[in-house]
Amino acid sequence: MKIHKGEVKMKRLLCILAALLLLAAAAQAEETLAGGVEFQAGWDVKDNNRVFYEIFVGSFSDSDGDGIGDLRGIINRMDYLNDGDPASGKSLGIEGIWLTPIFLSPSYHKYDVTDYYRIDPVFGTMEDLQELAALCHERGVKLILDLPMNHTGRENEWYQRFLEAHRENRTTDRYWNYYTWYADGEALPPAGRFMQENGSISVEANFSDEMPELNFDNPLVRRSMLRVGQYYLNMGVDGFRFDAAKYLYLNDHEKNTAFWKWYIAELKKINPEVYTVAEVWDSESVVLQYAGTVNCFRFSASQAEGLLASTAKGGNVSRFTADTERCLEELHRFRPDAMNIFFLANHDTDRAAGFLTAASWRMQMAANLYILSPGSPFIYYGEEIGLRGSRGAAATDANRRLAMRWGDGDTVRDPEGSDYESQTEDTVADMQQNEKSLLNYYRRLLMIRKANPEIARGAYQALAFEDTNAGGFLCTWNGHTAGVFHNPGKKEAVLDLRGIEGVSFEKIAAVIGKKDASFEDGILTIGSQTSVVLR
């Protein structure tokens, strides 16, 4: 076929025009993103201000029909968790996953580790873990492991060798001082729990006789646990949740924080952006002692009596935002990159659906309050469908770790020892078909957070409002300011924003809740149990 020079020139012009249009579109998209109505493909790897999703592995999704959730089950559910497209609205849109312990262990919960270098066969294989990590990274999701390291299981080889060394009185054995022990006749510390072993020693076991406490004064123990962390980072895991972080040296916070400072610094030599968060279940004054070293969950804001729930039930938002601002200021005095870690419930607490219901819109308001906040909030699996569970009369944590309800034939079962009977009838399959379901509410909520990156990352400024329980805060990042406002009450609220110095909002970027909202001439009107993002 003969091609004329004019045609060639025309094609070149069309190509140039197309290229210019693409460049213009890219520039417009970048500007729109800054305006908060477009989505990023995934967080920068350095950004840890992301929404995490805690999975109690044995209760989440079963891939092989044995009734126990496993790693392959999580892999199969990745499209539910994060499908790689933040704007699709088809996935939950989480940005991080916390797996409860997956190491070899005789219990259903796996906090009594037998071997840190083996995945428990009921959960799968090391290859499954690597595949999950790779899939997470393809979709901009970080994967962290729960690392219980203050104690091991009694079946752990380290503990068996420790007992053997004491039975045979081999005082020079490397395992002689691997665990914290006292000889008969020695005075035991007033704090702590101890068990008798070999008829001659008392071994520290603060949680149960199945969980003896390691001796972190022993350099061999420190190096052993460091090698565990390094091994999994090299395997592709992005970080760790440190179980019972104040128990390494029981309530000796100075020694604990010195250890964690060393440990995390060593991990950062492998991955400078390693994600770490610690369980320090104590008062805020104690938690702040760890703030210079590691991020900690905010237990004071969680559960039925916490500030999140009380605010969601119609409490004063200005009190909530002032408390958040105070907490951030205190954290940042210790460490500029310290993060606020909100959550409603986890595997050790009664589930949020027991004290906040979707029918009352209190669950939705609580979700708004903590998801639309700075830092790295954590969702407990099933929270998004109103999964229930509490210790109950049986006083067992198994009732807090019940099977996810998929409604599509998944064979995952409740864990052994559970007897909770008043479970929700709702399933994921049901809620996916209902545009107004709690699941779809969470999906939209996470999309709003993602579309407005100032919320997660920005400098926080609490706003004070009188004569109303409605309120909000400003968040400024990368030269842009967004405002987040909540009305947890049952009546419409009106907020006059004209007096906010240095900020002039132009539009409503998002409304989520029971009612609608309007904004005109600096006056924001918010319907009951509703939240608004202004830009």
Image (cartoon, rainbow, N blue to C red):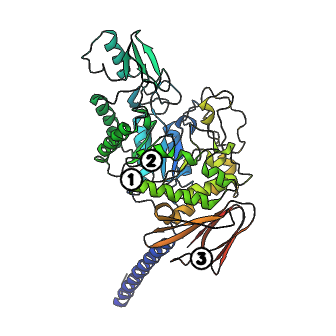
The amino acid beneath tag 2 is Leu
- Tell me the residue that label 3 is attached to: 507
> Where is residue 100 drawn, in percent x and y?
49, 37
Asked whether disc 1 touches disc 2, contact meaning CB atoms under 8 Å apart, the reply is yes
The answer to which image quadrant residue 62 occupies is top right
> Where is residue 310 drawn, in percent x and y?
65, 51
The answer to which image quadrant residue 228 occupies is top left
Q: Which residue is at the far bottom?
A: 6
Q: Nearer the viewer, residue 396 or 495?
A: 495
- The N terminus, quarter of image: bottom left
- Local packing at callout 3 (Cα closer than 10 Å; few below 14, some 14-19, many 20+) is few
81 horizontally vs 186: left or right: right
- Tell me the residue that label 2 is attached to: 288
> Where is residue 156 drawn, in percent x and y?
40, 22
Measured in 3D between alpha carbons, the distance from the residue under mark 1 to the one under mark 3, in whole angstroms, is 36 Å
Measured in 3D between alpha carbons, the distance from the residue under mark 1 to the one under mark 2, in whole angstroms, is 8 Å
- Local packing at callout 1 (Cα closer than 10 Å; few below 14, some 14-19, many 20+) is some
Q: Is residue 196 above or below residue 234?
A: above
- Tell me the residue that label 1 is attached to: 334
Answer yes or no: is residue 36 visible. no
The amino acid beneath tag 3 is Lys
Q: Which of the two labelled residues, at mark 1 and mark 2, occupies the earlier sequence position?
A: 2
- The C terminus, quarter of image: bottom right
Q: Which of the two labelled residues, at mark 3 and mark 2, occupies the earlier sequence position?
A: 2
**Tag 3's secondary structure?**
loop
Q: At 56% across and 38% down in the image, what residue appears?
A: 347
Q: Is residue 15 above or below residue 424?
A: below
- Local packing at callout 2 (Cα closer than 10 Å; few below 14, some 14-19, many 20+) is some
Q: Tag on residue 306?
A: none
